[in-house]
Amino acid sequence: MRILMAGAGATGGYFGARLAQAGQDVTFLVRERRYQQLQASGLVLQTPQGTETLKPQLAQASSLTGHYDLIIVTVKSFALDQVMEDIAPAVGPETLIMPILNGLRHIATLQQRFGEDKVIGGLCKINATLGDNGEVIQMTPLHQLYYGALDGNNDARLQRVDAALRDCQVDTRFSDNIMDELWEKWLLLSTLGAVCCLARGNTQQILTSRGGEALLQGVFSEILSVITAEGYQTRPAATARILELLSDQATPMTSSMYRDLSQGFDIEADQVIGDLLLRAKRHSLATPLLNAVDVNLQVYLQQR
């Protein structure tokens, strides 16, 4: 299977590297700066098991040739419009596009651009970041990759995707209910991002602060009410696990949005929090805590 990995940051770099190591034909679509960096130093993975370096196949938008079987989109959500233009020449009649982005707005955006039949569901769970020299740093052993048809019909096209991905040295989950997985991932990451960005700290600091536990539970409840109104079929055991994970004082956690904010980078405020507020308004839901988070993030973006 010919695979195009749109992006070679922490997520795209890690999972793309594992696919390449498993023998898949993987090309990384990157910008000029990342292209030069990877050409010079290779794609470096720093994992709990040690350091690995591989020489990746690289392409820039101007040099893409031919169609790909699978395009995995791993950029930040605010870069999606440009990436859609970049990957367009690589999309053929049989191409499938699997976005691994935060939130859910990107699915409709990709479907409108390329067609509903081309977009499949995907998400990952990994604690990873880029180091100062562009190395991919996997901070914990967690490396899960979920995928499946958005309508649950995992036909022969999806079976081919599974055959390519399942032996790539990561924990793969071929899901027949990927939409619920996507809703639950949004519930986790938006709660985590909201409380960390609002409180400017990790979950351990928040939970051990006066009112911190109430803040986390309040944000969680507001988000759960929004996604349920939008169509999420609540799985109580799953939502309880998410809240338990977030409420563990022994394990300090932060979100990628908070880490980006802490470094003065652009953040996915509209895609992670703003979209939830738009959906809440559609159902006349009161979300005062999410509104406070959104104002906080808007002010940050005005000041950067």
Image (cartoon, helix red, strand yellow):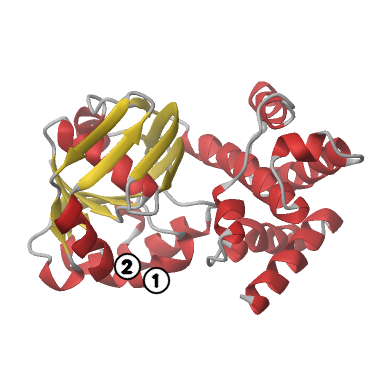
Look at the picture and state if 25 lies above or below 155.
below
Q: Residues within 10 Å of mark 1 (few under 14, many from 20)?
A: few
Q: Position of residue 122 (x, y in %)?
A: 40, 42
Question: Who is closer to the viewer here, 84 or 292?
Answer: 292
Q: Residues within 10 Å of mark 2 (few under 14, many from 20)?
A: some
Look at the picture and state if 176 lies above or below 287.
above
Question: Who is closer to the viewer here, 217 or 105?
Answer: 217
- Which mark is on residue 55? none
What residue do we see at 35% from left, 52% from top? Answer: 9
202 relative to 159 in the view: left or right = right
The residue type indicated by label 2 comes to Met
Residue at the far right in the pictured view: 210
Mark 1 falls on what kind of element? Answer: helix
CB atoms of marks 2 and 1 within 8 Å: yes
- Give the CA separation, mark 2 to mark 1: 5 Å
Q: Position of residue 212 (x, y in %)?
A: 85, 40
The residue type indicated by label 1 comes to Asp
Look at the picture and state if 244 lies above or below 83.
above
- Which mark is on residue 84? 2
Residue designated by label 1:
81
What residue do we see at 19% from left, 64% from top? Answer: 36
41 relative to 245 in the view: left or right = left
What residue do we see at 35% from left, 72% from top? Answer: 82
Question: Who is closer to the viewer here, 139 or 217?
Answer: 139
Residue 266 appears in the picture as rendered:
yes
2 relative to 301 in the view: left or right = left
Q: Quadrant of the C terminus?
A: bottom right
Q: Quadrant of residue 53?
A: top left
Mark 2 falls on what kind of element? Answer: helix
